Image (cartoon, helix red, strand yellow):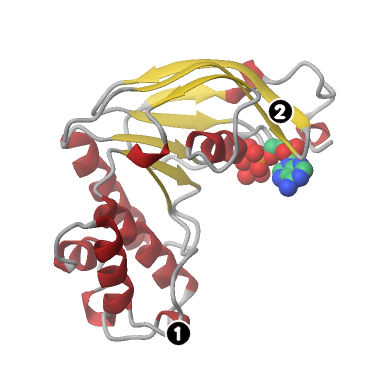
C-alpha cells in the first residue's frame, strides 16, 4: 500500500457553528495509528468528520483528501434487505476491490453471510460495518469508537485487522475511550481546545 502521510496543519473545526478545536497539527506516517483522546465533547468525532471531508475545516490544511479516506465503524449505508454477503459484494463493487471472503473471515461473519443485515444484532452489525473497511482499498481509516457493541472476540478480531492494515503501510486515526491494544501515537485533543469554549469541566464543552 502506497499511503501518503496523514498531515493536519493548523486545523480548526467547529460544530453547529461553535469552534471546538483549533491549531491541530499532527502527522501520521504510513504504518501508524493516531489515537485520539479527550473527554466527551472534546471534538474527536468532529475532527474525524472533518478529515473524512464530511465537513470543512474552518482553518488549516488536511492531506490526503477524502478520496484516500475510509470513515468506518458504523453500519451506516448498510442495506437492511440485503444479506451480509450481498452488502459486502455491493461495497466491493462500489470500490472496485476484490472478493469478500477475506472481509467475512476477518470479522467472523462467514456463518452469517446469508442473513439479512436488518436481522443482525448490534455487535454483528458493527462487525459488518468494520468489514466494509477492508473492501474500500483506502489507506487512511478513520474509526470513531469502533469497538462499541463488540464482544471480546470482536475486539480481538478488530485489533488484528487494524494491525494488519498498519503492517501493509496503512494509517488509522482512532477515537476511543478504551485501550484497544493497538500501539499508536496519542493525540490528546485537550491541548487544542478552541479558546471560545467555556473552561469549566468536561461537560461544559457541550455549549
Ligand atoms: N450537530 C451538532 N450541533 C451542534 N453542536 C454539536 C453537534 N454535534 C456535536 N456538537 C457539539 O460539538 C462538540 C464536539 O462534539 P464531538 O461529538 O466531536 O465530541 P467527541 O469528543 O467525539 O465526544 P464523545 O467522547 O462524547 O463521543 C460537543 O460540544 C458537542 O456537544
Instruction: Residue 154: give its label.
Output: none
- Up-down: is 52 above or below 25? below
Q: Earlier in the sequence, mark 2 or mark 1?
A: 2
Residue beneath disc 1: 119
Give the residue at x 50% y 48%. Answer: 145
Give the residue at x 60% y 33%. Answer: 56
Is the C-beta of the residue carrying label 2 under 8 Å from the nearest atom of ligand 1? yes
Q: Nearer the viewer, residue 190 or 80?
A: 80
Residue beneath disc 2: 20
Q: Is residue 98 left or right of residue 68?
A: left
Q: Nearer the viewer, residue 114 or 56?
A: 56
The local crowd at label 2, few if under 14, some if 14 to 19, many if 20 or more residues have their Cα within 10 Å, is many
The local crowd at label 1, few if under 14, some if 14 to 19, many if 20 or more residues have their Cα within 10 Å, is few
Residue 134's image quarter? bottom left
Q: Is residue 84 left or right of residue 58?
A: left
Q: Is residue 190 left or right of residue 1?
A: right
Callout 2: helix, strand or loop?
Answer: strand
Residue 164's image quarter? top left
Give the residue at x 62% y 16%. Answer: 191
- Up-down: is 52 above or below 192? below
- Residue 141 in picture, x, y percent from top left: 36, 42
Report whether residue 181 is seen. no
- Residue 34 in picture, x, y percent from top left: 40, 29
Specify the quarter for ligand 1.
top right
Amino acid at each position: 500500500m502506497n499511503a501518503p502521510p496523514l498531515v493536519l496543519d493548523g486545523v480548526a473545526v467547529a460544530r453547529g457553528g461553535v469552534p471546538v478545536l483549533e491549531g491541530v497539527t499532527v502527522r501520521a506516517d504510513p504504518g501508524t495509528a493516531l489515537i485520539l483522546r479527550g473527554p466527551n465533547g472534546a471534538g474527536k468525532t468532529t475532527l474525524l468528520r472533518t478529515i473524512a471531508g464530511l465537513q470543512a475545516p474552518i482553518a488549516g490544511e488536511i492531506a490526503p483528501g477524502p478520496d484516500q479516506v475510509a470513515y468506518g465503524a458504523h453500519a451506516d449505508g448498510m442495506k437492511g434487505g440485503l444479506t451480509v454477503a450481498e452488502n459486502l459484494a455491493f461495497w466491493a463493487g462500489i470500490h472496485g476491490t476484490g472478493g469478500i471472503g477475506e472481509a467475512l473471515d476477518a470479522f467472523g461473519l462467514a456463518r452469517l453471510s446469508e442473513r439479512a443485515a436488518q436481522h443482525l444484532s448490534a455487535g454483528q452489525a458493527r462487525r459488518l460495518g468494520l468489514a466494509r473497511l477492508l473492501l474500500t482499498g483506502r489507506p487512511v481509516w478513520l474509526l470513531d469508537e469502533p469497538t462499541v457493541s463488540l464482544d471480546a472476540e470482536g475486539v480481538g478480531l478488530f485489533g488484528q485487522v487494524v494491525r494488519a492494515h498498519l503492517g501493509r503501510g496503512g494509517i488509522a486515526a482512532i477515537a476511543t475511550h478504551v485501550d484497544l491494544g493497538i500501539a499508536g501515537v496519542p493525540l490528546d485533543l485537550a491541548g487544542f481546545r478552541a479558546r471560545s469554549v467555556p473552561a469549566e469541566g468536561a461537560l461544559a464543552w457541550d455549549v
